[in-house]
Amino acid sequence: MPIFETIIKRKPEMFLFLGDNIYADTEDMAEMRSKYATLKSDSGFAKLLKTCPVFATWDDHDYGRNDAGAEYPKREEAQKVFVDFWNDPADSPRRKRAGVYDAKIFGPEGKRVQIILLDTRYFRGPLKIGERRVGGKYYPEPDAPVPMLGEEQWKWLEKELKKPAEVRIIGSGIQVVPEASGQETWANLPKERQRLFDVIARTKANGVFVISGDRHWSEFSRVTENVPYPVYDFTSSSLNQIHPRGTPTKNRFRVSESTFHRENFGEIKIQWEGKETAIEVRILDMDGKEVFGTLVRLADLVSAE
């Protein structure tokens, strides 16, 4: 994973892992621990841990099974392995409750950044399956009340969004804004996706944008309908796993000038100084070269009401 060296050279203040951090795909916790041990032994990863604070959530492969949700029988055991590996303190809520969702706020008043990491695996119900197409076999389920986050996580999220912060970064293992084109996205459960937008509106939580992974390519997406203000989803993936197909799925919400299919990482810079705060998001390649990027004014992430 040589890209870690590139990341470290940029002197990050924080790094967020959004899932598929290992490829365990097992119900054997000894095997899962072995996969984590391999990651831990990587020199670049070890160096990153000494460089800056690191926070993580999981996706399907480190959860334990490809595309799995609440039906995965070892989710409780996998959660314990997860929090042990990421060195959650003894009093961490993730050691006491179901799911690995977490949130933290950094910075002084006026420059507060809230990090919200969701768990889109532990509680997720079954997805609708149909004829396989480019992207996969999953289809939107517009009517059935299939859960994504589970009621306890929804209550927690609403409470978190009511806390004071200027910038709020919501991390989701799977994409939130892009349309469902066969792959796993929030758009497969449109009621849950809209519920997320509604809770942002109801709590009057300004400054929200989403970061996601999973796809093995990078792209920027934006939705402007039925949201309190434009909601961006900045997708960065993968650090080292190149998808052999390399074909992006249809996404009418895509606003980046392209998609990128080689090793990459996302970089977020918040420009607090000047007349108005701006958020710069870029996709960088193995050499630290910018592939594409954008600048979003914090003033544009404010409810009109």
Image: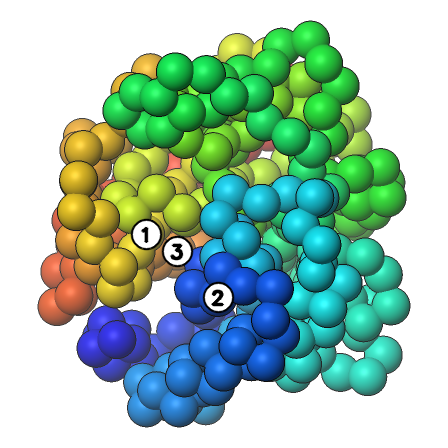
Residue 273 visible, this orientation: no
**SS class of the residue under badge 3?**
strand
Name the quadrant of the N terminus.
bottom left
In this figure, which residue is indicated by the disc labeled 3? 268
**SS class of the residue under badge 2?**
loop
Vertical arrangement, residue 228 with respect to residue 76, above or below:
above
Mark 2: few, some, or many residues within 10 Å (few <14, many ≥20)? many
Q: Which callout, 3 or 2, points at the residue further toward the start of the chain?
A: 2
105 sits left or right of 251 in the view: right
Residue 100 visible, this orientation: yes
Q: Disc 1 residue type? A: Ser
Q: Which label sits on residue 237?
A: 1
Q: Disc 2 residue type? A: Ala
Mark 1: few, some, or many residues within 10 Å (few <14, many ≥20)? many
Q: Which label sits on residue 24?
A: 2
Q: Which label sits on residue 51?
A: none
Vertical arrangement, residue 174 with respect to residue 165, above or below:
above
Q: How far is disc 3 from disc 2 in space, using C-alphas?
A: 29 Å
Do the residues bearing badges 2 and 1 touch, measured as CB atoms within 8 Å?
Answer: no
* Residue 48, percent from left and from top: 40, 83
Q: Which callout, 1 or 3, points at the residue further toward the start of the chain?
A: 1
Do the residues bearing badges 1 and 3 touch, measured as CB atoms within 8 Å?
Answer: no
Q: How far is disc 2 from disc 1 in space, using C-alphas?
A: 18 Å
**Which residue lies at the image location 61% right of the left edge and 64% below the top edge?**
27
Q: Nearer the viewer, residue 238 or 131?
A: 131
* Residue 170, percent from left and from top: 58, 46
**Which residue lies at the image location 26% right of the left edge and 44% below the top edge?**
217
Q: How far is disc 1 from disc 3 in space, using C-alphas?
A: 15 Å
**Which residue lies at the image location 40% right of the left edge and 47% below the top edge?**
214
Q: Nearer the viewer, residue 129 or 99?
A: 129
